[in-house]
Amino acid sequence: MRELSVNVIEKAVETLYIDANLRLSDDVVRAQAAAMDRETNPRARDIFAQMQENLKIADAQSMPICQDTGMAIVFIDVGQDVHLTDGSLTDAVNRGVAAACEHGYLRASVVADPIRRVNTGTNAPAILHTRLIDGDRVRLTVMPKGFGSENMSALRMLKPSVTREDILDTVTELVRTAGANPCPPVFVGVGLGGDAEYACELAKRALLRSVDVPNADPFYAEMERELLRRLNGLNIGAQGFGGDITAFHAAIEVYPTHIAGLPCAVNIGCHVTRHAEITL
């Protein structure tokens, strides 16, 4: 049994949360650059150039890429042969988020109560997703999720008789309805199966998959390609001004479900969909 102090996780959360807000992952940077090369709309190309300049400034000056530094979504896969010591995992994660907000000069965007709306001042608490996995390591992923895109999330409890085409139509319509609100071009995560709760988590986890990695199942990999083709035919374009590129990437994650239903969740990431990860 390997022991790991939650204080190590706390510090890792702080570092990852700051880093994710300052620098995009390499696959997202490549996706933006490739999209700019394919874009033919002059206005959209100009917006892409501004996006690229924004990334350079954020990196050079250690400033957040976006003013909305997001609610902290933290995914922790804990090896079953790890014994966490020195206190509560949840408390450690929230201390890490608070430290990142203070030391990284990140915007405090979390309210303690959804109706009374008093800001916590620390950007904590985080949304924490934990899973037990094999081994003696802890895999930690921090996703700062802005709510311009999060507000465009959707869940549809489809009938089990729906077809592949019906699902593609449903997701495409949800993105069309979202329009310019999620700061396109977007990354689209789709969760199929499970129950209502788990489909939404799958959709968010889909946004963590590298742009360079298709679904391992050829059936769903083809669906991803077709979905991306349809999304880029919407002509929403960069920041909603029209263009060839409405979406950088579409990812589908699936899970077994009940014979009487087919949950379909969509989670949209903005043009600066951010995350950072480490294995401890």
Image (tube, rainbow, N blue to C red):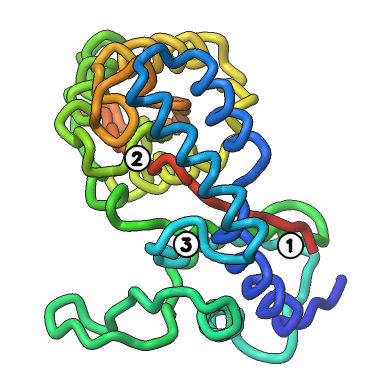
Q: CA–CA distance between discs 1 and 2?
A: 27 Å
Q: Which amino acid type corresponds to the residue marked 3 in the rendered image? A: Ile
**Crowding at label 1, few (<14), some or many (≥20) Cα neighbours within 10 Å?**
many
Which mark lies nearer to you, 3 or 2? 2
N-term mark: 1 or 3: 3
Which mark lies nearer to you, 1 or 2? 2
Q: Which mark is residue 268?
A: 2
Residue at left 24%, top 17%?
234
Q: Secondary structure at mark 1?
A: strand
Q: Nearer the viewer, residue 119 or 216?
A: 119
234 shown above or below 13: above
Q: Which residue is mark 3?
A: 73
Q: Which mark is residue 138?
A: 1
Q: Quadrant of the C terminus?
A: bottom right
Q: Which mark is residue 185?
A: none
Q: Secondary structure at mark 3?
A: strand
Q: Is residue 152 left or right of residue 90?
A: left
- Residue 220: percent from left, percent from top: 48, 16
- Residue 130: percent from left, percent from top: 55, 62
Q: Nearer the viewer, residue 184 or 111?
A: 184
Q: Is residue 5 left or right of residue 39?
A: right
Q: Quadrant of residue 230?
A: top left
Q: Quadrant of the N terminus?
A: bottom right
Q: Is residue 17 left or right of residue 108?
A: right
Residue furthest to the right: 2
Residue at left 58%, top 57%?
58
Q: Quadrant of residue 208?
A: top right
